[in-house]
């Protein structure tokens, strides 16, 4: 296949693609994704057609197939949500492409609205444009501008689409483009071989990671078991010392008197047993979930499209000034993190940035930075390991593990006259191993 210059790619008018397929009037029934392909299940007359839309990198083409990829490879991410919100239930009228096969678009109707969704390939990444037009206005979202825009125009939606691609910033246009159809010759066997090859590498890395993680957890489990055994010997003892040396942190009794100390012992043993159960569950999760995902080709990092908010320098400077004493990170899997560098910044984040259902993190029992995590669901073990590493980094702590204390932001209350200090309730506690490679797992 010839190599095309993309200097004039956005000047190419769209023309009909796959005119030989009976797709006019068919509708998109389901949409799902693998790490490399967006897959559209199209119900046509008497048949299902699966359209594979590359997510970028070497997967930079669009084609139909009668074969669906194994559901074990399916993933969900923000890009899939965008595609679903744009195309779910769409009655297809046309599939379009540019002359050099660099941009593909699906056009159709949903209710009274006319919709077009397109993906183009530049700088080894996928870019997208989605347009929804009704009788009153036109809504446009492009991946080089995060914010949706409203437009009033009498132009045909195809003209609007072409004009939008012409607005692609020049820095992305100047490259040589070659559709990669290496896997099309023997589809889907070549793709399955690619997955297996990637999975083998992932599996080897996962096995090493699991072994290291289990070794650390086993060490914690042994320490907890010994601590529990030691404390249980004092339950029947006639004398209980003021301090009992444990593997992690010594137990200093807060009360005097034999029976009051025994009550503290019972509570401590109960807490240690809860921690022991959590650590055993972590071992089980390591041995089964991570390994099975890698073995089946799951857990492969999905290819993400270009997604950038091209704000003006003045807007960025204004935002930076607004939170000048805070740092922000994004998980590669989604979710934002904010860290305050001083007491006032902590209050600012809690009052203006974090929502009630977001999470707040602190090092248990010690002075530390405050971390806020925008996520409704309970954080995963991997997310907790990254947050632990961030807390360790910003709190100038040493060691491989820290005690995490966390709760929902709605369970925090400020202490009057003490900036940065909070009271909390319904907290959770866990000892976490800090992720040494946390900076590779987040973006700024």
Image (cartoon, rainbow, N blue to C red):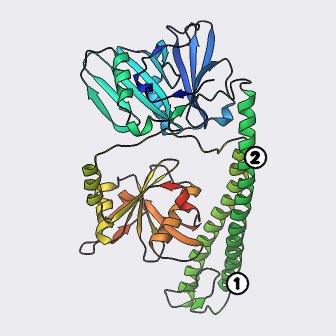
Q: Quadrant of residue 417?
A: bottom left
Q: Which of 426 and 122 is in front in this view?
A: 122
Name the side, left or right, on which 240 lies relative to 339.
Answer: right
Query: Residue at the spot x=62%, y=7% of the render?
Result: 46
Q: Viewer-nearest of labels 2 and 1?
A: 2
Measured Cα–Cα span from mark 2 to mark 1: 49 Å
Query: Residue at the spot x=48%, y=72% of the render?
Result: 364
Q: Position of residue 388 (x, y in %)?
A: 52, 66
Name the quadrant of the C terminus: bottom left
Q: Nearer the viewer, residue 59 or 47?
A: 59
Q: Where is residue 79 in the image (x, y as percent from the top left)?
A: 49, 36
Which residue position is annotated with label 2? 200
Name the side, left or right, on which 301 lies relative to 109.
Answer: right
Name the quadrant of the N terminus: top right
Neighbours of disc 2 within 10 Å: few (<14), some (14-19), many (20+): some
Q: Does the image show residue 256?
A: yes
Name the side, left or right, on which 188 lies relative to 365.
Answer: right
């Amino acid at each position: 296949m010839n190599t095309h210059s993309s200097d004039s790619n956005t000047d190419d008018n769209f023309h009909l693609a796959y005119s030989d397929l009976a797709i006019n009037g068919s509708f998109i029934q389901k949409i799902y994704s693998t790490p490399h392909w967006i897959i559209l299940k199209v119900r046509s007359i008497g048949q299902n057609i699966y359209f594979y839309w590359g997510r970028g990198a070497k997967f930079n083409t669009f084609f139909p197939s009668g074969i669906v990829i194994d559901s074990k490879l399916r993933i969900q991410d923000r890009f899939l949500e965008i595609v679903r919100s744009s195309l779910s239930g769409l009655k297809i009228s046309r599939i379009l492409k540019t002359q050099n096969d660099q941009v593909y678009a699906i056009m159709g109707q949903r209710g009274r609205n006319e919709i077009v969704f397109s993906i183009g390939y530049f700088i080894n990444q996928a870019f997208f444009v989605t347009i929804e037009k009704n009788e009153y206005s036109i809504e446009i979202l492009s991946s080089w501008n995060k914010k949706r825009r409203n437009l009033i125009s009498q132009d045909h939606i195809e003209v609007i689409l072409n004009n939008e691609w012409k607005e692609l910033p020049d820095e992305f246009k100047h490259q040589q483009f070659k559709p990669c159809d290496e896997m099309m010759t023997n589809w889907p066997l070549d793709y399955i071989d690619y997955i297996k090859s990637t999975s083998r590498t992932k599996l080897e890395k996962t096995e090493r990671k699991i072994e290291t993680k289990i070794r650390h957890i086993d060490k914690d489990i042994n320490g907890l078991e010994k601590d529990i055994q030691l404390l249980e010997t004092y339950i029947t003892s006639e004398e209980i010392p003021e301090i009992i040396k444990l593997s992690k942190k010594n137990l200093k009794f807060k009360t005097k008197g034999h029976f009051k100390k025994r009550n503290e012992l019972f509570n401590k043993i109960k807490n240690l047993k809860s921690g022991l159960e959590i650590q055993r569950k972590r071992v089980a999760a390591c041995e089964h979930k991570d390994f099975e995902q890698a073995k089946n080709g799951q857990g492969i990092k999905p290819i993400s499209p270009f997604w950038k908010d091209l704000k003006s320098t003045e807007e960025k400077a204004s935002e930076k000034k607004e939170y000048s004493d805070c740092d922000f990170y994004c998980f590669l899997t989604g979710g934002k993190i904010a860290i305050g560098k001083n007491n006032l910044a902590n209050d600012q984040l809690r009052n203006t940035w974090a929502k009630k259902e977001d999470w707040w993190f602190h090092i248990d029992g010690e002075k530390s930075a405050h971390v806020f995590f925008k996520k409704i669901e309970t954080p995963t073990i991997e997310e907790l390991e990254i947050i632990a590493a961030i807390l360790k980094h910003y709190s100038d702590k040493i060691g491989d593990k820290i005690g995490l204390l966390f709760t929902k932001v709605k369970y925090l209350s400020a202490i009057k006259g003490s900036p940065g200090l909070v009271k909390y309730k319904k907290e959770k506690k866990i000892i976490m191993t800090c992720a040494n490679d946390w900076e590779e797992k987040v973006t700024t």
